[in-house]
Amino acid sequence: MDMDIQSACSADMMSTVMYYHTANSLLITGLSQPSVVRTAEMAGIKAIVFVLNKKPDENIIDIARQKNIPLLTTSYCMYTASGKLYEAGIPSCLGK
């Protein structure tokens, strides 16, 4: 997977994502509902990471595939996943 991720945002409330997002970002969330993918598309988010081993269902996977938005999962909690990305040099969306 080759994409330009410039920042990351962590949220479970999609209204928060719409307010604080930046284009070309990564969304870290524990919410596994179709609205996550739809929000990501509207916000220009390039990929979604589901925390705590949450697995998106087939409907979410199909929507993401149609929108060309990669879905990833991690066993980390949102706090740790966000911190690891920050340590790797990916800034917060709030830095805009």
Image (cartoon, helix red, strand yellow):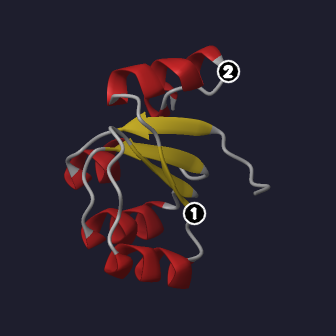
The front one of 50 and 4 is 50
The front one of 93 and 96 is 93
In the figure, 26 relative to 64: above or below?
Answer: above
Is residue 91 left or right of 80 when viewed as pictured? right
Task: Name the residue at 27% across, 59% down.
Answer: 32
Image position, residue 93 (x, y; %):
47, 34
Q: Quadrant of residue 80?
A: top left
The front one of 71 and 45 is 71
Q: Return the residue at label 2.
A: 89
In the figure, 21 relative to 36: above or below?
Answer: above
Mark with earlier residue (2, 1): 1
**How many other residues sit within 10 Å of disc 1, few (<14), some (14-19) or many (≥20)?**
some
Is residue 64 left or right of 33 when viewed as pictured? right
Is residue 9 left or right of 69 when viewed as pictured? left
The front one of 47 and 22 is 47
Q: Which mark is residue 22?
A: none
Task: Name the residue at 43% across, 74% down.
Answer: 61
**Tag 2: amino acid:** Gly
Tell me the element at label 1.
loop
**How many other residues sit within 10 Å of disc 2, few (<14), some (14-19) or many (≥20)?**
few
Q: Return the residue at label 1.
A: 70
Q: Mark 2 near mark 1, Cβ–Cβ under 8 Å?
A: no
Image position, residue 43 (x, y; %):
44, 60
Image label count: 2
Task: Name the residue at 44% across, 47% down.
Answer: 27
